[in-house]
Each structure stands twice: as structure tokens, then as C-alpha cells.
Amino acid sequence: MFKKKHVDSIIRPGKTIGAFCSTPSPKITPYVLVNFTGKSRDVFTLAHEIGHAIHSISASGKSILVSDASLPLAETASTFSEMLLYDKLSETVTKNEKKIMLSEKIDDFYATIGRQSFFTLFEIEAHKQIANSTTVDEISRTYLQNLNEQFGNSVKVSDDFGIEWSCIPHFHHAPFYCYAYAFGNLLALSLFQRYKKEGKSFVPTYIEILSAGGTKKTEKLLRESGIDITKPKFWQDGFDYIQDQVKELSKLN
């Protein structure tokens, strides 16, 4: 990708913000757009988008009709790539840098797992309301209730946040996509735990998962690789990893 100059990282006037990976066809090397300022966050964003590209390249042998990964797996390779980078950097940074990295990573876990799960719960309720005829104010009240359930007594949420749902593009342009972030991140964390235990012997299994593209249902594909997502323990491994990171940050403080 870098040799073919398919990574657009330079900030310039008129360039769109954010980051994304685009694969026009399985036979075309993916394109990645990022806005790189040199911050550590930008490096992780690049790793995330390169992960998407690796997923596409791995499945490039499949038909264009089934080369895209299923929605539950859409964020798995991107998150796994971030974890590889995080694990590597953790071995070389100073104590203070490690604290910053841990804080940012734990924040990311909340944003991509906890928050996205609550987004999905809100969408379910909002669509039920819409089906029975509703108003913007009623949907806003539902969203505010969702926020209060999410934060409990830890954060006081003002009523102004009730309308926040209208500013979240996924709700409007990609309904019910948000659960894929929670699913993909927990799956990636569990896969990463397995990689740490098995080492290089896990690599063929991982590549096999990515190369399948969208040819198989998620549950069937993972089961063939010895991964049973119907077992609570598999998902618990992901949460256990997050708990370990929180404990490590507490020790450093």
C-alpha cells in the first residue's frame, strides 16, 4: 500500500476530516485516508485503517459479491491491528508514556464497546417508537434515559444531551451498525488473548478468518477455526483483558 502510494496521510486545505479505508474492488489494493499530525493517536488510527486494508487484501481471492466481511467481523481486523501496535509499544515506552497509553486505550474500550452497545439499545427502542408514530422530543427523552442508565451516578447528564442522537451519523446513514464495533472489539480482544497464548501458531487461523471475507456466517466461520462465540467464556476473555488494563493503570498511579 505504501509502495503504491495508496495511503493519503498529509493534511491539506479542503481535505476531508477523519479516517477511512476504501476497497473499490477485491483486485484493487485498498486506499487509506488519514490525517496524520504525528501524535500517538494518529499512529493507532493508521494501524486501525491498515487493519481494514489487510482484511480486504486477505479476502481478495473471493468474488466481489462476497469479498466484504460480514458486519459482525467488519471491525475485527482493524481492532486486532491496533492491539498488535499497542502491545509492541507497551514494551518500549516510559512509565509516564505507559500511563497515557493505558488511559487512552481504556477510554477507547469504553467508546467502542460500552458506548456502542448503548447506542444499539437506543436504536432498538427508537425504531420501535418510530414504527408506532413518535416525535423528536419523545426520541430525545428515550436517548436521555439511555444516557442516564449508561452513566448511573458517575456522571450527571444535562437535558441538553437528549438531542445528541440527531448528530450521530451512524443512526441515519448506517442503522444498527454500532453493535459491530462492540462485537468486533470484544472478538478482537479475545482473539488477541489467544494469539498471546499460542504465538505464531495462531497466525494461520487468523489469516483463514480474514480470507473468508463474507462467504460464511460469522458463527460458522469462527467455529471452523475452533472458536465458539456461543460460549460466555470466549467473550469474558475480552472483558478480562480490559479489567487487567484497568488494574495495571491503577498500579502505575
Image: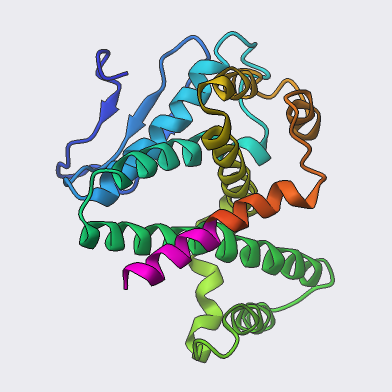
Q: Is residue 31 left or right of residue 35?
A: right
Q: Quadrant of residue 172?
A: bottom right
Q: Please report the residue visible at 46 percent of the width from the left and 66 percent of the height from the top.
A: 246
Q: Quadrant of residue 68?
A: top right
Q: Magenta segment, principal secondary structure? A: helix
Tell which of 115 and 193 is nearer to you: 193
Residue 206 magenta-highlighted: no
Q: Is residue 157 visible?
A: yes
Query: Which residue is found at the position 79% from the left and 37% from the top?
Result: 228
Between residues 141 and 2, which one lies in front from this camera angle?
2
- Above or below — where is 170 with respect to 45? below
* Magenta stretch, residue numbers: 242-253
Between 21 and 49, the residue placed more toward the observer is 49
Front residue of 169/87: it is 87
Looking at the rendering, in which quadrant would you find the C terminus? Answer: bottom left
State the image coordinates of residue 110 (x, y, percent, origin top left). Answer: 51, 64
Q: In the displayed structure, would residue 154 be above or below residue 15?
A: below
Task: Name the residue at 52% across, 27% down.
Answer: 199
Q: As drawn, is 62 to the left or to the right of 47?
A: right
Q: Position of residue 188 (x, y in %)?
A: 57, 41
Q: Please say whether residue 246 is one of the residues in the magenta stretch.
A: yes
Task: Please report the residue visible at 82 percent of the width from the left and 66 percent of the height from the top.
Answer: 131
Find residue 153 and report its horizontal and vertical position in percent.
Answer: 57, 91
Left or right of 230 in this view: 244: left
Q: Is residue 212 left or right of residue 246?
A: right
Taking the image as drawn, is residue 176 in sight? no
Question: To which quarter of the image does residue 198 belong?
Answer: top right
